[in-house]
Amino acid sequence: MKVEEIARPQPGPGEALVRVLGVSINHLDLWVRRGMPGVKIPFPRILGCDGTGEVVALGPDAEGPALGTKVVIEPGMSSGNSPQDAAGLDHFAPDYSIRGEHCDGLDCEYVCVETRYLLALPDSLDPVAAAAVPLVFLTAHGMLVTRAQLQAGESVLVLGGASGVGSAAIQIAKNLAARASLVPTKSSTTATRNGAKRSRPGPSVAVSTWFSSTSGRRPGRARWRSLRATDAW
């Protein structure tokens, strides 16, 4: 792992240049470095599947968040042309990929992203804290809302409630007025603070409420820093 200088990207058609404000460390970052059976990842690779930023430039014909808007960056992407995409199941598309795994990720100062993968952040949410939201909340939302179709008044058992996905699942269940229980872990206190055993309004509720309601680079002259994995463990 090393920090190095890379060319500042320039946004292409339909893209925005985003100044990265916050990134999180997801377990996927560890898997990418460690290596996964049957998955060949070329190195070096810029890590980072989760992140937030500020739109600082727009490419030709780009429509989306205005300049200066703080955004959360969707971790996954696809061409949008497959039957799975049309059905709203882009994560099943043959060309679906995740930033930081299948391509360079967000652990750098500037990134170019198609504007359709940018979602404006409410002013009430800290962009650094919100950087930990995307992938774990997408996973938990897919399990509880899309597949299980969790309803108000129902109960849900969360295994590993202090994990990223577990913590997100508790908050989503709480937002749906469901009852969340967890299997105790060494860090179960964190999970209970998110609402598994007691209900208390706070930032976790704001994040889950907001999330539930929204559900190629070109070189430049300047050079900017990025965190790049140079080899698997």
Image: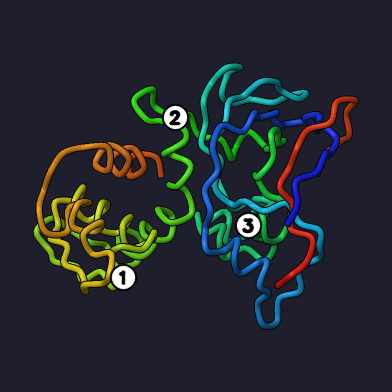
Q: Is residue 183 left or right of residue 30?
A: left
| Quadrant containing the C terminus in the rendered view | bottom right
Q: Which residue is mark 2?
A: 121
Judging depth in this view, the residue of 97 and 196 nearest the camera is 196
Dot 3 amino acid type:
Ile
Q: Secondary structure at mark 1?
A: loop
| Quadrant containing the N terminus in the rendered view | bottom right
Residue 3 vertical position relative to residue 34 in the rendered view, above or below: above
Q: Which residue is painted at 61% across and 69% down in the image?
A: 31
Q: Residues within 10 Å of mark 1 (few under 14, many from 20)?
A: some
Q: Which residue is painted at 56% across and 32% down in the image?
A: 21
- Mark 3 or mark 1, which has the lower sequence index? 3
Residue 96 screen position, x and y as percent: 65, 60
Q: Is residue 4 left or right of residue 48?
A: right
Residue 200 screen position, x and y as percent: 13, 43
Q: Which residue is painted at 37% across and 30% down in the image?
A: 125
Dot 2 amino acid type:
Leu
Q: Which residue is mark 3?
A: 98
Q: Secondary structure at mark 2?
A: loop
- Mark 2 or mark 1, which has the lower sequence index? 2
Spatial separation of the CA atoms under disc 3 and disc 1: 24 Å
Residue 57 vertical position relative to residue 97 in the rendered view, above or below: above
Residue 39 vertical position relative to residue 119 in the rendered view, above or below: below
Q: Which residue is painted at 27% across and 43% down in the image?
A: 204
Colour scheme of the rendered structure:
rainbow
Q: Which residue is mark 1?
A: 160
Residue at the bottom extreme of this rendering: 37
